[in-house]
């Protein structure tokens, strides 16, 4: 679990699990009032560094097909690698990967 702080306030969190050479990002949450401040980018960069230190070659995540986060991940170099139809909460999700 990664956390981004300012003073004692948590601004963002990420759950990452590195297994079999893949850094699986389970969650990435940044408080709404702190969007577009680079917090998510910094957490993603740290996830990449942790994955590399653990002999990883790829990052993997899922996100809602029509969510704003999709554009964020694409801007970081992720590519869509699959679709999960009618998945969590009856929403279509996409699988995204980035080789590192």
Image (cartoon, rainbow, N blue to C red):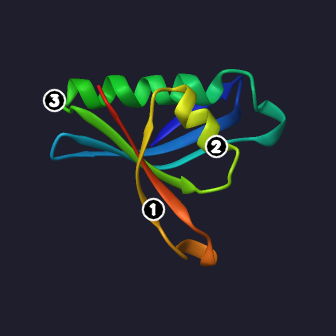
**Left or right position of 23 against 87:** left
Label 2 – label 3 distance at C-alpha:
27 Å
Q: Which mark is residue 55?
A: 3
Q: Nearer the N terminus, badge 1 or badge 3? A: 3
Ranked by sequence position, the earlier of labels 1 and 2 is 2
Label 1 sits on residue: 83
* Circle 1 SS class: strand
Give the vertical position of 93 relative to 5 (above or below).
Answer: below
**First along the sequence among labels 2 and 3:** 3
Mark 2 lies on a secondary structure that is helix
Neighbor class of circle 1 (other Cα within 10 Å; few <14, some 14-19, many 20+) is some
At horizontal 24% and vertical 25% (from top left) the residue drawn is 52
Mark closer to the observer (1, 3): 1
Foreground label between 2 and 3: 2
Residue in view at x 84 percent, y 35 percent: 33
Residue found at the far right of this picture: 33
> Which picture quadrant has residue 47?
top left
**Quick one: 100 or 39, which is closer to the camera?**
100
Residue receiving disc 2: 69
């Amino acid at each position: 679990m990664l956390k981004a702080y300012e003073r004692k306030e948590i601004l963002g969190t990420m759950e990452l699990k590195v297994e079999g050479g893949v850094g699986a990002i389970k969650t990435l949450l940044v408080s709404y009032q702190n969007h577009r401040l680079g917090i998510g980018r910094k957490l993603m960069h740290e996830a990449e560094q942790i994955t590399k230190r653990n002999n990883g070659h790829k990052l993997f995540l899922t996100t809602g097909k029509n969510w704003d986060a999709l554009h964020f991940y694409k801007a970081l170099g992720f590519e869509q690698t699959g679709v999960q139809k009618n998945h969590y909460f009856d929403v279509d999700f996409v699988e995204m990967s980035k080789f590192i």
